[in-house]
Image (tube, grey):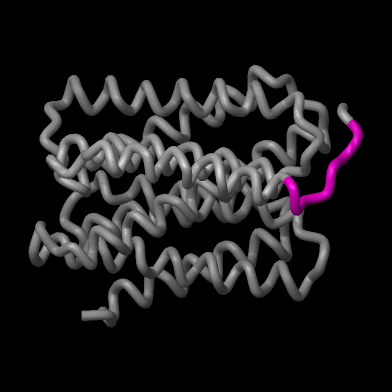
C-alpha cells in the first residue's frame, strides 16, 4: 500500500508548515510549535506509537534549517516539495509497520527518510556554523544529539537484536563518531553540502555494519565492501568539489 489518506493529510500539513516558515521566518517558533503538536497527535493516530514522532519531526526541522542556506527561490521551493515527499514515506512506513511489523518495504522507507533527515541536519548545522561563527563544540553537540535520537529510533524500526541498554550504547557510539567526524572536518576547506554528504557516508557505513552484525548478515566481504565504498565515494566527492579557504 502506497496511499493512505491520513498520511497524505499529515504530509500536506508538513508541506504547508515548511512553506509558511519559508515565507514568514519570523514566525518560526509559532509555526513549528503548532505543527509539532499536530504531528504528535497525528503520528499516534496513524502509527499507534509516539516514538514514530521522532523521525518526521527531525526531518521537518532539518529541512527548515537547511532552507535559508539555499540561494535560489526555485530550488528552495523544489526542496520543500521533495522534503515533504520524504516526510510522506517516513509516516507511511510507520503506518505500514503498525499493520505488519516485519514489512521490509516500510523499513526501507523509514531508513531512506532517516538518511535524508540526517543529511539535512548535518548540512544545515555546518552551514549555520560557517555563516554565523558558532562554536565548534555547539555543532559537535548538535550532531551528537541528532545522531543519537535518530539512531535509537532506527535500531527499533529495524528490529535489531538489541536490548534497551545496547541500543543506547550503540546510539552513543554513532553520536560520538559524528561529533568526532565534524570536529575533524572543521579543518577541511569544503562547503556545508560536501561536508554533510561526507559525514552522512561515514554514518551510513558505521550504521550498516552495526545493523548487519545484529541481523546476522555481517561478513568479511561486507566489511571490505563498506571500507572501499567509504574510501572511494569520499575521495570522488572531495576531488570533484570546490575547495574553499580555511576559516
- Relative to 151, does residue 11 appear above or below in the rendering? below
Most common SS among magenta residues? loop
Q: Name the spot of residue 38 as percent of width and height, x first.
A: 38, 58
Q: Is residue 202 left or right of residue 182?
A: left
Q: Residue at (54%, 24%) from the top-left corner?
A: 179
Q: Residue at (16%, 61%) from the top-left corner?
A: 97
Q: Name the spot of residue 22 as percent of width and height, x first.
A: 70, 62
- Please tell me whether residue 62 belongs to the stretch shown in magenta: no
- Please tell me whether residue 240 belongs to the stretch shown in magenta: yes
Q: Residue at (55%, 63%) from the top-left corner?
A: 17
Q: Is residue 65 left or right of residue 206?
A: right
- Relative to 212, does residue 166 appear above or below in the rendering? above
In which image quadrant can residue 43 be found?
bottom left
User: How many labels were placed on the picture?
Assistant: 0
The part of the chain drawn in magenta is 239-245
Q: Name the spot of residue 2 as percent of width and height, x first.
A: 27, 80
In which image quadrant can residue 212 be found?
top left
Q: Residue at (76%, 24%) from the top-left corner?
A: 187
Indicate the quadrant containing the C terminus: top left, top right, bottom left or bottom right: top right
Indicate the quadrant containing the N terminus: top left, top right, bottom left or bottom right: bottom left
The residue closer to the viewer here, 237 or 106, is 237
Q: Name the spot of residue 205 as percent of width and height, x first.
A: 41, 40
The residue closer to the viewer here, 212 or 45, is 212
Q: Is residue 131 left or right of residue 60?
A: right
Amino acid at each position: 500500500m502506497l496511499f493512505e489518506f491520513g498520511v497524505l493529510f499529515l504530509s500536506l500539513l508538513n508541506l504547508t508548515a515548511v512553506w509558511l516558515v519559508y515565507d514568514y521566518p519570523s514566525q518560526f517558533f509559532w509555526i513549528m510549535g503548532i505543527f509539532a503538536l499536530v504531528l504528535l497527535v497525528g503520528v499516534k493516530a496513524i502509527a499507534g506509537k509516539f516514538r514514530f514522532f521522532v523521525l518526521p519531526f527531525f526531518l521537518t526541522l532539518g529541512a527548515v534549517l537547511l532552507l535559508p542556506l539555499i540561494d535560489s527561490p526555485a530550488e528552495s521551493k523544489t526542496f520543500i516539495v521533495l522534503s515533504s515527499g520524504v516526510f510522506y514515506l517516513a509516516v507511511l512506513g510507520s503506518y505500514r509497520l503498525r499493520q505488519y511489523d516485519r514489512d521490509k518495504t516500510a523499513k526501507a522507507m523509514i531508513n531512506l527518510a532517516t538518511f535524508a533527515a540526517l543529511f539535512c541536519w548535518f548540512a544545515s548545522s555546518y552551514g549555520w556554523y560557517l555563516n554565523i561563527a558558532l562554536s565548534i563544540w555547539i555543532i559537535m553537540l548538535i550532531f551528537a544529539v541528532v545522531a543519537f535520537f535518530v539512531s535509537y529510533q532506527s535500531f527499533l524500526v529495524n528490529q535489531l537484536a538489541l536490548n534497551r541498554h545496547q541500543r543506547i550504547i550503540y546510539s552513543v557510539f554513532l553520536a560520538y563518531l559524528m561529533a568526532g567526524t565534524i570536529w575533524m572536518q572543521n579543518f577541511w576547506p569544503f562547503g556545508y553540502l560536501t561536508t554533510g554528504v561526507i559525514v552522512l557516508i561515514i554514518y551510513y557505513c558505521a550504521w550498516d555494519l552495526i545493523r548487519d552484525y545484529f541481523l546476522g548478515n555481517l561478513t568479511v566481504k561486507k566489511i571490505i565492501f563498506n571500507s572501499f565504498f567509504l574510501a572511494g565515494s569520499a575521495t570522488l566527492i572531495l576531488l570533484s568539489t570546490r575547495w574553499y579557504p580555511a576559516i
